[in-house]
Structures are given as structure tokens and as C-alpha cells.
Amino acid sequence: MADALDLFNSGVLTGEREGAVLPDRKLWESKKGGVVIVECPQRIPCNPCHTSCPTGAIRPFADINDTPTVDHSLCTGCTLCVASCPGLACFVIDLTFSEDKALFKLPYEMLPLPEKGQKVQCLNRIGECIAEGTVENVTQPKKDRTYVIHVSAPKEVVDEFRTIRAVK
């Protein structure tokens, strides 16, 4: 109940809950390309994450207001859901990127866009810098306003890192 009140009072998601569940760690650590994390803990009429998913990893909604559920074994890390989500609630994390770094594929709608090789601050859900990362790629899977920034960062921040701040 405290997590629900925290989210209601502050707008900040604290911990796992329905609509915001991390994948099974064993599967996650072996899945090349990464797996999607969906942090959409409130029931709202929305389903672009499901309709954009080419593998069916984001399961069909019984009701348009349902929170998303994911079959992580079907996810390829393609990022179509990341670019499709109007709430910026989807992102992909690839734990197979390197021995000590994960690759985070994050939605990004700010200008100017970060560039490949650029150093960025890795921020947690409340905007605190928790690490430094490097932009590995910038893509635009849906050719609309949402880009996907691929950032390598320490694996230790995998449970906390959710967005970036460009560093000059």
C-alpha cells in the first residue's frame, strides 16, 4: 500500500508492482539484444506498446485500461514499443552488452539529440545522477518524434537508471 501512496502522492514509481515488473534475472542475463521493461503501473486507456510489438511479447490487453504484461522470453529488444509508448514507459535493457556494462535503450524526445560517443549522466526516477554513461547509438524506429538513445552504463544501476541528461 505504501508504494501505491508514494506513486499517487509524488508521481514517482518506487519498486516493482503490477504494470512495472522486472524480468526473470536468469533469462535477462542471457537474452542477446535485451528485453523490454514496461513501467506503466496505472490503469489508463492505452495499448500502443502491445500493437507495435512484432513478436507478441507485450501480451494482448483484455481491457484497453489494463496494465501491460510482458512475456520476456518472446522479446527481441527491437525497441518498437519504446518508440510507440506515448508515456515513455517502455525501455530495453541488454545485460549481455559487455562484462561490466549494460546497454540501455531509452526513449528520448528532447533537442538537441545526444550524439554517438557523447558522455551523459544516468538519472534515476527522481532525476538524481547515479552514474556516467556513453551514447552508443541514436535510432528512430518509428520515424516520429520519439528517438531511442542507446547508452552503455554500469550494470550496477540496472534497477535505477531510467533517463539521461546530456553533458557538455
Image (tube, helix red, strand yellow):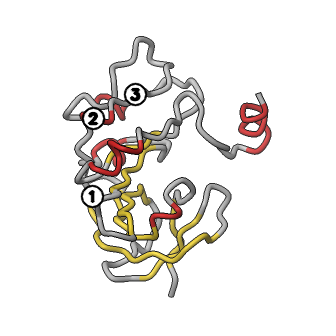
Dividing the picture into quadrants, the one containing residue 99 is bottom left
Residue nearest the viewer, comparing 109 with 19: 19
Q: Residues within 10 Å of mark 2 (few under 14, many from 20)?
A: few
Q: Residues within 10 Å of mark 3 (few under 14, many from 20)?
A: many
Dividing the picture into quadrants, the one containing residue 107 is bottom left
Q: Position of residue 77 (x, y in %)?
A: 27, 48
Residue nearest the viewer, comparing 149 with 104: 104
Mark 1 and mark 3: Cα distance apart in space: 20 Å
Task: Identify whether 31 is placed above or below 6.
Answer: below
Q: Residue at x 44, y 82 (%)?
A: 119
* Dot placed on the residue nearer the N-terminal end, 3 or 2: 3
Q: Which residue is mark 3?
A: 47
Task: Identify whether 51 is placed above or below 145.
Answer: above
Mark 2 and mark 1: Cα distance apart in space: 24 Å
* Dot placed on the residue nearer the N-terminal end, 1 or 3: 3
| Circle nearer the viewer, 2 or 1 | 2
Find numbered disc 2 in the image and state the secondary structure of the residue it sits on.
helix
Amino acid on which disc 2 is placed: Ser
Q: Are marks 2 and 1 in contact (CB under 8 Å)?
A: no
Amino acid on which disc 3 is placed: Asn
Q: Position of residue 134 (x, y in %)?
A: 40, 77
Q: Which residue is mark 2?
A: 73
Q: Residue at x 37, y 30 (%)?
A: 70
Q: Residue at x 47, y 47 (%)?
A: 88
Q: Which residue is mark 1?
A: 140
Q: Residue at x 66, y 67 (%)?
A: 128
Dividing the picture into quadrants, the one containing residue 100 is bottom left
* Dot placed on the residue nearer the N-terminal end, 2 or 1: 2
The quadrant of the rendering that contains the N terminus is top right
Q: Position of residue 32 (x, y in %)?
A: 23, 53
